[in-house]
Image (spheres, grey):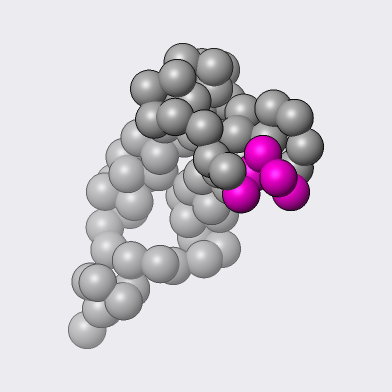
């Protein structure tokens, strides 16, 4: 996958992750609470789950941007 496309996609995913971290309250109110998260993560578990998902997005995007992992090789195999 082209370097520029990998960087652009990673930046978009990082932006989504930051929005999930910063606006978890609004996200949970848009999509509703998660019963599993409330049971296993305690009170406010839905907010914690949204923040964890945002953090995972940021970490995976950074690893992809720097070429440590290559998830797009499955979709766009190099010749």
Q: Quadrant of residue 68?
A: bottom right
Does residue 43 appear to the left or right of 7 in the view shown?
right
Does residue 78 appear to the left or right of 28 in the view shown?
left
Residue 48: x and y in percent read 67, 33
Secondary structure, magenta segment, majority class = helix
Residue at 71% in and 45% down: 39
- Front residue (pair 11, 21): 21
Residue at 48% in and 55% down: 64
Q: Which residues are magenta?
A: 36-40
Looking at the image, which residue sits at the far right? 42
Up-down: is 43 above or below 22?
below
Residue 35 in sight here = yes
Image label count:
0
For the C terminus, the image quarter is bottom left
Up-down: is 67 above or below 41?
below
Residue 70: x and y in percent read 44, 67
- Front residue (pair 42, 78): 42
Say whether residue 39 is magenta.
yes
For the N terminus, the image quarter is bottom left
- Front residue (pair 24, 72): 24
Residue 15 in sight here = no
């Amino acid at each position: 996958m082209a370097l520029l496309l990998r960087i652009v996609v990673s930046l978009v995913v990082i932006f989504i992750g930051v929005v999930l971290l910063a606006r978890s309250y609004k996200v949970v109110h848009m999509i509703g609470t998660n019963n599993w998260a409330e049971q296993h993560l305690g009170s406010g578990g839905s907010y914690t789950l949204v923040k964890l998902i945002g953090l995972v997005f940021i970490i995976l995007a950074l690893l992809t941007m720097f070429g440590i992992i290559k998830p797009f090789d499955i979709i766009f195999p190099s010749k």
